[in-house]
Image (spheres, grey):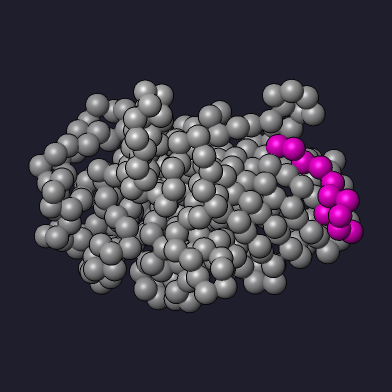
Amino acid sequence: MGYRVVVVGATGNVGREMLNILAEREFPADEIAAVASSRSVGSEVEYGETGRMLKVKNLEHFDFTGWDMALFAAGSAATKVYAPKAAAQGCVVIDNSSLYRMDPDVPLVVPEVNPEAIDGYTVRNIIANPNCSTAQMVVALKPLHDKARIKRVVVATYQSVSGAGKGGMDELFEQSRAIFVGDQVEPRKFSKQIAFNVIPHIDVFLDDGSTKEEWKMVVETKKILDPKIKVQATCVRVPVFVGHSEALNVEFEEEISAEEAQEILREAPGVMLIDKREDGGYVTPVEAVGDGATYVSRVREDSTVENGLALWCVSDNLRKGAALNAVQIAELLGRRHLQKG
């Protein structure tokens, strides 16, 4: 006997990826519902590569009663209205938006890092999925933190345009084509030209000069990994379609060598260490696309602090940064709380 699962926002980039991953991982679902806004009603989405097509249902009128879990990829506005409704009707919500991440009554979960946190879902019947950049970073940091206790992290992100949705991907494509043929380029989705450029600005600016994306990485890392860790982030949008990269400088309380870190990361859940000190002996976003791993490369000692390491971290932001983590949460929820059969 399997689960009855709803994917909300099923026609978007992340929603489609959730359907792909549910099918790919053979999630034990007896029934799947694809749900989206009224403008998508009547269209069809494929359930992975099974050839099975799902007719999209209207979120506005959907009854969550009797459904076990709902994976939300609908954005904060729709989630604010419909996630509490689903939760109240007995369906556990796994939410990909930023809406509930810092709610003290909602667990923020990365299964490889803090699986025990999921037990708190019963307060609101909602579980939050972290920011895409935070998710891959804490997967890489957790095993190192267990070994030597992290004091401080300085991170610069190189985030793909898919993090801004289909509109971001379309803008990169259209601007690149326009530049090649000499046409005018007008930014719409981003604040400046994204093609052949980088933009040190993701989300809105806050009073202290940081952006909300940078703030998310700070507070989410503390909630997931350890409230004592200090985090400084600079988040940059780059002209890459899929795949987020991060350059990390990590300061530890205890001594840890690059060789020790490599050995730990080689065995860490969710991590793939590709670290050859030669041309091409590292992973780039193109190679991470379609994979669920968090890739770590360029592990080396940072001589500017007493116990420091520098490393490079890459992941497919639509998978581990969003859809895969949500499905892994669903699997964890099933194992710990909603066992069937």
Q: Residue at horizontal 60%, vertical 32%? A: 284
Depth check: give the residue in front, 76 or 261.
76
Residue 203 horizontal side relative to residue 22, left or right: right
Residue 235 horizontal side relative to residue 127, left or right: right
Q: Residue 39 at what x, y percent from top left? A: 13, 48
Q: Residue at horizontal 56%, vertical 28%? A: 287
Depth check: give the residue in front, 206 or 37.
206
Q: Residue 41 at what x, y percent from top left? A: 12, 46
- 311, above or below 88, in the image: above
Q: Please check the rendered image and state whether residue 137 is part of the magenta-colored stretch, yes or no.
A: no
Residue 283 horizontal side relative to residue 242, left or right: right
Range drawn in magenta: 297-308
Q: Residue at horizontal 66%, vertical 67%? A: 226
Q: Residue at horizontal 55%, vertical 52%? A: 200
Q: Residue 328 at what x, y percent from top left? A: 46, 49
Residue 107 horizontal side relative to residue 263, left or right: left
Q: Please check the rendered image and state whether residue 307 is part of the magenta-colored stretch, yes or no.
A: yes
Q: Residue 29 at what x, y percent from top left? A: 30, 44
Q: Quadrant of residue 241?
A: top left
Depth check: give the residue in front, 253 or 282.
282
* Residue 27 visible in rendering: no
Q: Quadrant of residue 40?
A: top left
